[in-house]
Image (spheres, rainbow, N blue to C red):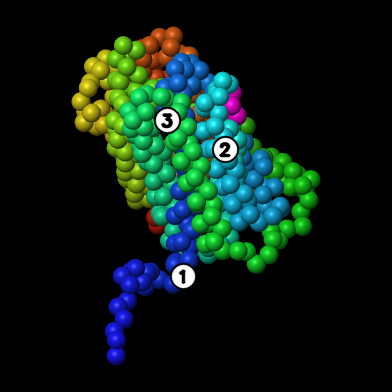
Amino acid sequence: MKYEKTPRYSLLWGWIPAPYRKPLKWVPTLYFTEGLPNVIVMTVAVTMYMQLDMSDTEIALYTSWLGLPWVFKPLWSPFIDIYKTKRWWVLAMQILLASSFAGIAFMLNASFWFQGTMFFFFVMAFTSATHDIAADGFYMIELDSHQQSFFVGIRNTFYRFAVIFGQGALVALAGILQVIFRNQIAYTWSLVFYGLAGLMIAIWLYHSFVMPRPAERNNTHLTALQVMHGVGDTLVTFFRKLPLKGIIVVLLFLLLYRFPEAMLTKMSTTFLQRPNSEGGLGLSPQEFGWAYGGIGVFGLLLGGIVGGILASRDGLKKWLWPFVIALTLPNLVYVYMSFALPSDLRLISACIFVEQFGYGLGFTALTLYMLYFSQGEFKTSHYAICTGLSYLGLLLPGMFSGWLKDAVGYRTFFIIVMACCVITFVVTAFLKIDPEFGKKDATANQ
């Protein structure tokens, strides 16, 4: 009798509990797809436009506008519930994302390259925001509560993998291609985006086969007018959760808590890559990909994990001020680097790690406060409004950060960023938080 050896992958697959096997085929790739266009629009576009000789004023203004779809996505998210299925929306948005990648690649070699690429970047941003809504809805529909809890860490990890892939691997790949093709910037970036279009088509084909098919269309009898009334009711209840003074405090916190970081984000990207003659550190795309897209993202992840552990142990209120300090004071590393102009990549990477680790801790406070404020009726919708307002708080300062930097230079700009940290402290000082919120025992008893 002939013995047939069991394939190794089958043995490994057998260790995975049955309820998790099918979701494991699509959850990681779905959330990688959710993160990829976001990092392309908000970070990779900054590097690309910088290499195409745009000023920091232009880069900050135009790329900040691209964040608008994520600010306003709660307004059209209810319509995704009444038309087609979540699966249909996910697959449709993925093929549109592939088209927008290809559109950018094509436009980079046109005479009107800036207008053309900005158009397709905006299409990508709108499509990505819509994909976020549909993907999260599909995740909640197809998985029960226990499966959702099991996969939450996996989905967040693969979202961060997309950030590393975008900020790290893609920027480094562009740098390698620029060496091979003798610094033909537009041509090399078009190759990168054609590759992204191919990758997105492959993901679309894969999801077409592995994503579960719902038994029926969205089970709703609401009309578009009824949905609009529902959106209005949600907004009204959001602004009536607290007295007027309390709502003003919340709005200011959501809009201004990350004000220094909003000023810093885009200019830190250009500072690290612009030459010493322009006040920057002159990192190559490969070095930038390693330091910012690799070490920096690892610091961000670690900060978020540590922040979550601390808040779950002792509650948000106890750690609020340490989180605020962690969000603001590490920005000093950019003041130091702008004066010292270090050339040691290890030292630069360490500075980036410190700043991003602090940001990960500080962002924990914002996330938990949004969850705290959103408790009660319309919890999901109110949280979406909070995230939209928080995103708007990043977008507005980012628009004029480039103009300010071009007016005063990197050194003075980073000093101004540190002075703006006072804003974060002021808007935090007026918050009122239940001391028990966030504690493991307290949430278990709710």
Residue found 47% across the figure and 41% down from its top: 196
Q: Residue furthest front?
A: 181
Q: Main secondary structure of the magenta part?
A: helix
Give, as a single range, the part of the protein colored magenta. 115-119
Taking the image as drawn, is residue 347 in sight?
yes
Eyeballing the image, is 256 above or below 361? Answer: above
Task: Kindly check if marks 2 and 3 are in contact, taking CB atoms under 8 A apart as contact.
Answer: no
Quadrant in the picture for residue 234: top right
- Which type of secondary structure does the marked residue at label 1 adopt? helix
10 Å crowding of disc 2: few (<14), some (14-19), many (20+): many
State how far apart marks 1 and 2 are (Cα).
Answer: 36 Å
Report x, y in % for residue 21: 44, 67
Magenta stretch containing residue 352, yes or no?
no
Amino acid type shown at disc 3: Thr
10 Å crowding of disc 3: few (<14), some (14-19), many (20+): many
Amino acid type shown at disc 1: Pro
- Which type of secondary structure does the marked residue at label 2 adopt? helix
Amino acid type shown at disc 2: Ser
Residue 100: give its label.
Answer: 2
Residue corresponding to mark 1 = 19
Residue corresponding to mark 3 = 188
Quadrant in the picture for residue 232: top right
The residue mark sitting in front, 2 or 3, is 3
10 Å crowding of disc 1: few (<14), some (14-19), many (20+): few
User: Counting residues from the N terminus, which is met first, the one under dot 2 or under dot 3?
Assistant: 2
